[in-house]
Every structure is written in C-alpha cells, then in structure tokens.
Image (tube, coloured by chain):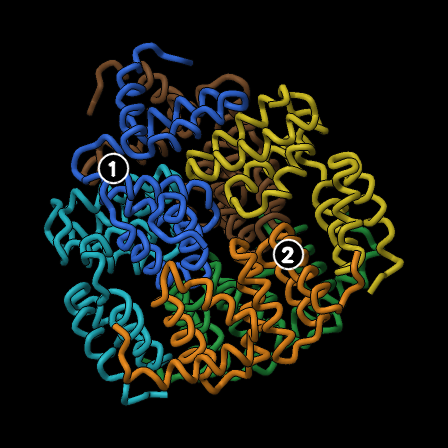
Chain colours: A cyan, B blue, C yellow, D orange, E brown, F green
Amino acid sequence: MNDTVNNDRYERGWRKLQEIDGEAGTRVVESLAKIAPDFARYIVEFPFGDICSRPGLDLKSREIAVVAALTALGNATPQLKVHVHGALNVGCSAQEVVEVIMQMAVYAGFPAALNGLFAAESVLRERGLLPAT
Amino acid sequence: MNDTVNNDRYERGWRKLQEIDGEAGTRVVESLAKIAPDFARYIVEFPFGDICSRPGLDLKSREIAVVAALTALGNATPQLKVHVHGALNVGCSAQEVVEVIMQMAVYAGFPAALNGLFAAESVLRERGLLPAT
Amino acid sequence: MNDTVNNDRYERGWRKLQEIDGEAGTRVVESLAKIAPDFARYIVEFPFGDICSRPGLDLKSREIAVVAALTALGNATPQLKVHVHGALNVGCSAQEVVEVIMQMAVYAGFPAALNGLFAAESVLRERGLLPAT
Amino acid sequence: MNDTVNNDRYERGWRKLQEIDGEAGTRVVESLAKIAPDFARYIVEFPFGDICSRPGLDLKSREIAVVAALTALGNATPQLKVHVHGALNVGCSAQEVVEVIMQMAVYAGFPAALNGLFAAESVLRERGLLPAT
Amino acid sequence: MNDTVNNDRYERGWRKLQEIDGEAGTRVVESLAKIAPDFARYIVEFPFGDICSRPGLDLKSREIAVVAALTALGNATPQLKVHVHGALNVGCSAQEVVEVIMQMAVYAGFPAALNGLFAAESVLRERGLLPAT
Amino acid sequence: MNDTVNNDRYERGWRKLQEIDGEAGTRVVESLAKIAPDFARYIVEFPFGDICSRPGLDLKSREIAVVAALTALGNATPQLKVHVHGALNVGCSAQEVVEVIMQMAVYAGFPAALNGLFAAESVLRERGLLPAT
C-alpha cells in the first residue's frame, strides 16, 4: 500500500509535524511502529501533509481549533496535551491556550473545560510556564 | 433571582452578543422568552458578559474555537450556524471558516466535518458568499 | 427467541410503559413492528420491566435522570420529548422539567441545554402548559 | 494542493466508493463541489483510496463496523443511511444490518439504537426490502 | 473582570458549593488557583450561585440529574465522583445513587453505566458505605 | 426481582459470555458483586442472553461491531479491551481487529483510533501476539 508516488505528501507532512508537535509528534509516530505502522504513515500524510499544510488558515488558528475540539470532545487527553504543546510551538501564549479551554465551558460544559485545564496545566508546568507545585 | 447588581455583566454581554451574533443572537434570546427567560439572561451574562468579554484572546480566535468545537460535537447544528455567522461577523473569511470545519475531519471524523460543511454552506449562501443553487 | 417464560417481565414492563409514557410509549412500540419487532419487545422488557420497575428510586426521580441524560447527550431529541411527557406524567411540574434542562448548561454546555429547552417547549405547548405562539 | 502524483489513490478510491456506495457516494462528492471541492477529493482518497482499499478486512466487515460506529455516535444520520446502503451493496442482508443496529442498544443506549433502526428502515423501504407504509 | 457588584452571586454560590460538595468542592476551587483562578470564580458564581441556588427544583433532584448526565457523558469521572459525594451530602441514599447510574445503561449503554458504578463504588467505600475490599 | 422464570436467559447468557469473553467476562460479573449484583445479572441476561444469542448475525461480526463502536465512542477503554479479547476469542485475527480500529479514524477521528490502537496493543501483547517492548 506504500505508494512511492506519495512521497511528497509524506515529506511535507513530516516537516509540518515537526514544526507543530516537535518531539511529541515523533514519539506518536514511533509508538505506532509495532501495532500499526501504516497508521503512523497516514497520520503524517493526511492530517499533516494534506490538512495542516493547506493555505487559507494560519497554523496558530489551526491549533486553537484543535485545542478547542479536543477539550470539547473530552475523550482524548493524551492528544490534547500534544496539541497544547503544538499551540505553544506555533505562537500561542499560555494565556491564549487557557482562554480557549475556559471558553469550552460554554459549549461543552464545565467538566470538559476543567479536565482540559488540568491537561494544559501539566504541559505548562513541563515547559516551565507555571511554577512547579 | 434577577440581581440588579448584575446589570454590568448583562449590558457588557448584550453589547458583545450584538457584536458577534447580531440579529441571530437577538433571535436566540427572544426565542427563550416563553420557556425560560432566565436562561436567556444567563446566555447574555455568562458566555457573552463573562467569557467572550475577557481580554487575552481576540474575538476572531474565539469564534474559530467555537466553530471547531460545535463541528466536532456534531449535535448542535443551529448553534453552529449562529457561530458561522459570528465568525464572519468578527473578521473570519469564508475560506477560514471552511478550513476550520474541514480540519475537524481529523479530530472528530469525516461525518462531523461533512455535516459542518453543509451547515456552513447554508450560511454562506444566505450571506451571498456562495452562488445560490 | 420469544421465551414464553418471560411473560412476567413483558407484562410488568408494559404496565410501567403505560404509566410513564402513555400513548407515546405505545407509538414507539408500534413503530418498530415492521423493522424490528423483537426490539419493541426488548424495550418493554428491559428498560421498563427490569429497570424502571425496580424499587429503590421513585419514578419521578427516574424521569428526572432520563431528561437530564438525554439533554446532555444531545443526540436523541425524539426520545427526549417522550421523556418530557413521561416526567410530567409521573408528577414533575413543567418548572421542574425546565430546571433540569437548564442545569445541563453547566454539565454539557449551553447548546445542549438550549436544544433541550426547545424540545421541552414543544411538549409543553402540546399539553397546553404554555400559550400557543 | 492537487498533487498529480496522487492519481493512483484517487482512482483506487473512486472505484471503491462506487463499489460500496454507488450513486449515493457520487452524490456526496458532488454535493461538496461548491463549498469544499478539496474535501470531496480527500473523501475519495483517504477513506476509500487508503483505508477501505486495504487488505486484511473484507468489505462486508468494514461496512458492519461503520454502521455500528455511526449508530453509536448518533450524530450523523445522513452518513448512516449512506452506509446502510453500503452494507447492503457489499453483501450484508437486511437482517444483518438490523442486528448490528439493535446490538448498539447495549453499547450506546436504546435511543441511539432506536434512531439507527428508523434510519435503516427508510433505506430498506427505499430499496423495496420492507413493505411501504 | 472581578466585578465587585457580583459579590452576592459569589457568596451565595460559595455557600451552595459547601452545602453540596463540602471539602471536595473547596479542593476543585483551590486546584485552579495557579492555572485559571477566574475559572474557579466562575464555577462558584454560575453553576452554584446562579443555577443550583434557583428555586423550583430541590437539591436532591438536582444532584440526581447531574449524576445521570455525567454517567451518560462518560468522559468526566473525577466530576462524577464529586457529585456522587454531592448526591449523598444532600440526602440521596447509596441505593438511590446506584439506581440512577444503573438506569443509564438504558440511555447511554452498559459500558457507561459500568464505569459509573465503579466510580460510585470508590466513593461509597471511601465513606464507609461499602465494606473495604 | 430475580424471576426464576428467567433462568433460561441467564444460563444462555452465561454460556455466551464464557464463549466470547472467557475469564474477562467472569471478572466483570464478579467485580459488580458488592456494588450492584443485579446489574451483573442484567449484563448476563440482556447483552449476552438476549442480544448476542440471536441468530441472524455471526459472533465474529458482532464483535467487529462492538470494537468499532467502543473505539468510536472513545470513553470506555476497559470495555474495549474486553472486546478486543472477545473478537480474538471468536475468530478475528489480530490484523482484522487492528483494521477495524484504524478505520474508525475516518468516522470518529484520529485521536479515537489512536487510543483504540493503544488499547488493542496492550491486549495483543498480553496474548503474546506482539513482541513485548
């Protein structure tokens, strides 16, 4: 299934994955090596090579959209943490990330926002943007 | 329950609701007059008077977050349409709205994105931003 | 599959279904006659014959729980309407139903509560508990 | 963005889309022509060209999985109908489709199963597999 | 943003939070001190000061509604535990809480009910209402 | 509530539970002994005695449907693991399970599929179907 003709999408996606998620992105791809290596390739190709590489919306807005959606859905905490990193990597301030998550209380309820804030807090601490407890 | 001391929040919220949602916001508030007038007041006060009036995140980014979340949740089409209007009202281009919704295919699946696109399409047509069918 | 030994559960369930949902319950069961008659039987037996017939929680509290859950899930409007009828049939006031739904804004977001209120409004009008528009 | 090198994926996907969804698939693609033509292309390429074209799981099992998931999620009725057609097109019997949907009562609740059954019923009638009402 | 005119809502909310959630409520508010202190204030003001302080529905019914909704949504276990405490604090028996959660099997599926029961079990043990394992 | 007339359903369900879930099924039933023994009985009777014992859909297809639905819902990881075991127990290959879960990226988003794959991986390792890390 590994069409060599798709190399462009993979390479473009890999660069975009590095730009947004850095090491965390590499770890997600590596974590799939045993169970579903093709899925690792799809993640690079479709979300990053096709979607996030599109013109028409800046990367900062794209990451704001993802942090909002994952907070609202509330069932993907590991991915939310990766994208809090991503949002900070492409230019969001810690405050902007916190504002997006707080706002989800209105659209998905206070528990979803609360759990999103705790996920963000662990990322902000890891990056030294909040004092350690 | 109608604390007169809260007038500031209500007035600030009403102005913000007008700025973001315009007539569509007024219609939501009016539609609640019979069934739950206090809920109409809460919508003005909390989402608009408290949350959307906060500094720290620009209104355009706030509406991008809402369009993303409502597309991903997939169970609030009328509200998604109101916020597609809202996003356009505060400075998003039609293309940016479409990009946000398309991106949700990655995080909430293709059916959610597809239904979001059809909701956006009806708003864009209504505003003359797409040719009528 | 139609174990005659299960008649007790079916009869107990049917009486409970009538008590809670009245005609609306009969219509749900009849609506399944062509597509899945066994599923109609299961609805009578398990939710009504087993669960709703249990001691330990009064019917009014059971219907409050259902109205809350269906409002929060947000993807089952027809069933929410049936259970707004059910809540009123077993002793909830219109105000209590509206309070339960409004409260869901906190736990599942304002759009879920808003759509729940509109569903309740149509039932309340149908029963003459709100003036016709 | 329309990499000519991706023609293989698109063509493979288009053939698979025709095999599974027939005319209904064509209509979905055409319906996106105005609002998001690139998204139409992605639907052909990724879900059909990449995923559904993979060996390792037969098409009938793939459609059973989709009907189950869309019934459980409960917020994508138009797509559920398309995939009830799809399941029947690739060899599921009407009874098998109904069994899959009924089973979802266990995993996603009776309302989700009920709404799934009504969606399936409209498709089965359209195909003459149930008597018209 | 901290309108001094809102003191009434905050104080009324704080008393209600103590009445319902006791220490667990205080811990939630404190846990937000670093990441989002304003969100802690909103939790006191809106859910507790505005909503839970409303007349028209008794506190026991309110907590039954919350336990039902959080069990059904299935993505907020920490908050479900807080509200199992809350339900017990305002007069629900352990049996009533268990009945509400079991009933969610009908509306949100057996897995949601099962996970809700395990969350409740840990609270009931903590309060000495079940024998330690 | 323990109708002796229902013994047939219980015994049929218990045999089916053993056939599908083996020891993991027994553990789920035992885990409910303290908190909700009647719920343990319902799980045996309705999902296994009524639904999974029905003719019209083979067990392998039933487990494919469950793995798909639980991956898509994304809020029931323990149950997903039980049913990955179940799918393997009734004849699915490891590859087929992985294909079903990967396919959910299309219908419920990449995070849901990713978390499903990690749940499956832990089951496959436990059964020696993947090398230990």
Q: Is residue A66 left or right of residue E107?
A: left
Q: Position of residue E49 (x, y in %)?
A: 37, 21
* Image coordinates for residue D128, horizontal then vertical, percent: 75, 68
Task: Label 2, secondary structure: give it.
Answer: helix
Q: Nearer the viewer, residue A92 or E26?
A: A92
Q: In front: D13, or C66? A: D13
- Which residue is disc 2 drawn over? D113
Q: Badge 1 sits on which subunit?
A: E
Residue occupied by mark 1: E32
- Seen in the picture, residue A36 relative to A47 is either above or below; the reply is below
What is the x, y in percent for residue A53? 22, 67
> Nearer the observer, disc 1 or disc 2?
2
Q: Amino acid at mark 2?
A: Ala
Chain at numbered mark 2 = D
State the residue at coordinates (53%, 52%). Answer: E112
Q: What is the x, y in percent for residue A6?
A: 28, 83
Side (left or right) of A107 relative to C59: left
